[in-house]
Amino acid sequence: MREIIRSRTVEIAAASQAVLSTIDVRTIAPNERHDLIFSSFNALPQGAALELVNDHDPSPLHRQFKSNYHGLFTWDYVEQGPDLWRVRIGKAPGNCCGSCS
């Protein structure tokens, strides 16, 4: 199991994971953001992704994903600032240990 992080801009059409939802955290109260993102990620089927839109680099969120979902997610920067950040967060296929529902 390994996580995949791509720090370069990627083409949406070339992405192997279908984006099922977009979460624009700029419109969400700060204390509700991470819970919403993690619950949305947990609801994804393997091989699917969500897109996160933010006004800054979500590197603290990335650290949380590494801690909580090490090897079970992909992290693709679609756009990297300076005013808008878009990240595709995918549920990596084939890495289920059998304990998830």
Image (cartoon, helix red, strand yellow):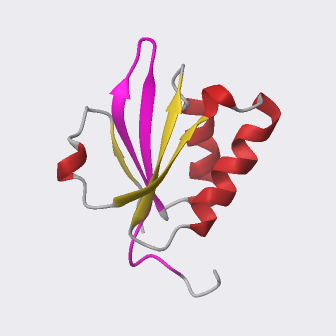
Give the main secondary structure, helix, strand or loop, of the magenta stretch: strand
Q: Tell me the residue at 62%/33% (across/down).
A: 25
Relative to the observer, which residue lies in front, 64 or 9? 9
* Residue at (25% x, 32% y) in the render: 9
Q: Residue furthest top?
A: 82
Q: Is residue 26 left or right of residue 73?
A: right
Does 13 appear above or below 25?
below
Would residue 36 be counted in the magenta stretch?
Answer: no
Question: Is 28 placed above or below 4 here?
Answer: above
Quadrant in which the N terminus appears: bottom left
When the figure is inspected, residue 62 is found, relative to residue 30, above or below; the finding is below
- Residue 63: where, in percent of width, then height? 59, 41
Left or right of 45: which side holds 93?
A: left
The answer to which image quadrant residue 27 occupies is top right
User: Above or below — where is 85 with respect to 24?
Assistant: above
Image quadrant of residue 98?
bottom right
- The tally of labels here is 0
Q: Is residue 94 magenta?
A: yes
Observer-nearest of 45 and 67: 45
Q: Nearer the viewer, residue 41 or 100?
A: 41
Whole-percent x and y of residue 5?
37, 45
Q: Quadrant of residue 81?
A: top left
In the image, the segment drawn in magenta is 73-96
Q: Position of residue 50 (x, y in %)?
A: 47, 52
Nearest the eye: 15 or 57: 15
Q: Residue at x 65, y 83 (%)?
A: 101
Name which residue lies at 41% across and 66% down: 92
